[in-house]
Amino acid sequence: MKKHLLRNLFMSLAVAGTLGAGAFVANPTTANASSWKFAGTTVTYHINSTSKYYNGMWKNAVKAWSKNGVVKFKSVAASDKPELTLTTRSLDNDKYGTIFVQPRTINANHEINAAYVALNRNAMKFLGLGLSDRTKVAESGMGNALGLDYTSNKHSVMYEYAGDMGMSGVTKSDLNNLVNLYK
């Protein structure tokens, strides 16, 4: 079971949302950019956690994606309806994997109005991930929420089999893919 979770660390990603009147589910694997992105380059976000541990983890992930300045992040209260909600949940390992990313609303231009990223605390604990690796998982979930797909590039935080090969944080290549997506 543990090997199954490792192999599917990022493949277990569930992406769901609405586009017009229809719903879709996607599991992107090879492209650098998905069919969606935020409309602007400033994204409001809210970390929905009372835990200092997970708050710090999410802040580190936000900082990693902020490095090149392509997308700027602005922290807001939950009541301000953030575009990006970052949280953790305790979910069944077999059903949900490690990351759950949900673009809540997407307009006709494939622009995300709101997205939700949740990391499965149970799966991360089961896999024995420490803070550094959990932060990398958070970075990967954020990358997908920003519009990056999972990739076969072993040196990317978006690498689809990161659990098998060791995890990478946000790389220059990842940041360049973000530049290309938001230009």
Image (cartoon, helix red, strand yellow):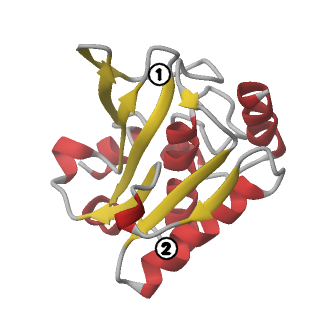
- How crowded pointer 1 is (Cα within 10 Å; few <14, some 14-19, many 20+) is rated as many
Image position, residue 89 (x, y; %): 26, 63
Closer-to-camera residue (29/145): 145
Tell me what residue is drawn at x 43 percent, y 70 percent: 77
Closer-to-camera residue (179/99): 179
Image position, residue 104 (x, y; %): 33, 37
Where residue 177 sits, quadrant-wise, is top right
The reply to whether residue 128 is visible in this rendering is no
Where residue 125 sits, quadrant-wise, is bottom left
Q: Amino acid at mark 1?
A: Pro
Which residue lies under the disc numbered 1?
A: 28
Indicate the secondary structure of the residue bearing disc 1: loop
Q: Are marks 2 and 1 in contact (CB under 8 Å)?
A: no
Which residue lies under the disc numbered 2?
A: 130
Where residue 136 sits, quadrant-wise, is bottom right
Q: Which quarter shows the C terminus?
A: top right
Tell me what residue is drawn at x 53 percent, y 24 percent: 36
Tell me what residue is drawn at x 62 percent, y 23 percent: 33
